[in-house]
Image: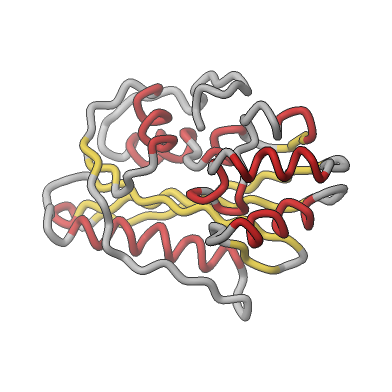
């Protein structure tokens, strides 16, 4: 099994499932396309990442995943500056947005290619400017879609969510279990996660 990602959060979630796997960086170029549904785009991105690694490892079971944050129909990526991270968090304040996460599995030698998505809804209460400044100063936002980690101690008190926590963190373990069942793996579809700061 290969995880086509270097995300420490996805790695931790797969480890919680008890899987033996290797992490590899996918060279697939991510993109956004607000003219199409976020679900279609996030499926393509997850599949693209898995395919890029699978072509060099045809016998491997390659897992690719992508997370898309959507506010008012607009697809949001990772902030690239302090100003952009601040603006994203200000825009989430007193609002509800969506997170759509895809899990794709590709095994070239078996002609296997599937992708599924899971959606969650996150609601922020009023996010104080001081909290935003303090959080952005930690440097935590820059490797995360939407610019925040729901389980971070500065963010956690201000959010509620509907859906799966692992979807929001970056890898719906129930979808991983469904895919891998096709290869004879018997895994729990629900990894027990507490909403703490251990996965950042």
In the rendered image, the quadrant that contains the N terminus is top left
Residue nearer the viewer, 111 or 128: 128
Which residue occupies 77% across, 65% down?
72
Which residue is at a point 57% across and 38% down the rendered structure image?
Answer: 138
Residue 78 percent location from the top left of the image: 54, 57
Relative vertical location of residue 40 with respect to residue 78 in this rendering, above or below? below
Q: How many marks?
A: 0
Looking at the image, residue 164 lies above or below residue 91: above
Give left or right: position of 8 versus 40. Answer: left
Query: Relative to 85, is 95 on the left or the right?
Result: right
Return the residue nearer the eye: 178 or 165: 165
In percent of width and height, residue 126 lies at 87, 42
- Location of residue 79 in the rendering, given as x and y in whole percent from the top left corner: 57, 58
- The residue positioned 54% from the left and 43% from the top of the image is 139
181 w.r.t. 107: above or below: above
Q: Residue 32's spot in the image, x, y percent?
A: 53, 72
In front of the other: 36 or 74 = 74
């Amino acid at each position: 099994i290969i995880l086509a990602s270097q995300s420490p959060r996805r790695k931790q979630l797969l480890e919680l499932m008890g899987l033996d796997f290797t992490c590899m960086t996918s060279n697939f170029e991510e993109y956004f396309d607000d003219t199409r549904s976020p679900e279609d785009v996030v499926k393509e991105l997850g599949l693209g990442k898995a395919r890029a690694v699978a072509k060099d490892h045809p016998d491997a079971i390659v897992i690719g995943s992508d997370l898309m944050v959507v506010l008012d129909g607009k697809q949001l990526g990772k902030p690239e500056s302090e100003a952009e991270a601040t603006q994203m968090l200000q825009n989430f304040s007193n609002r509800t947005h969506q997170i759509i996460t895809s899990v794709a599995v590709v095994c070239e030698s078996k002609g296997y290619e599937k992708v599924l998505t899971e959606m969650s809804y996150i609601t922020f209460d009023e996010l104080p400017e001081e909290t935003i400044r303090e959080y952005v100063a930690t440097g935590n936002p820059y490797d995360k879609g939407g610019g925040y980690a729901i389980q971070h101690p500065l963010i956690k008190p201000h959010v509620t969510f509907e859906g799966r926590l692992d979807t929001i963190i970056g890898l719906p373990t129930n979808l991983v279990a469904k895919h891998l069942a096709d290869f004879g793996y018997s895994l729990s579809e629900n990894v027990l996660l507490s909403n703490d700061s251990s996965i950042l």
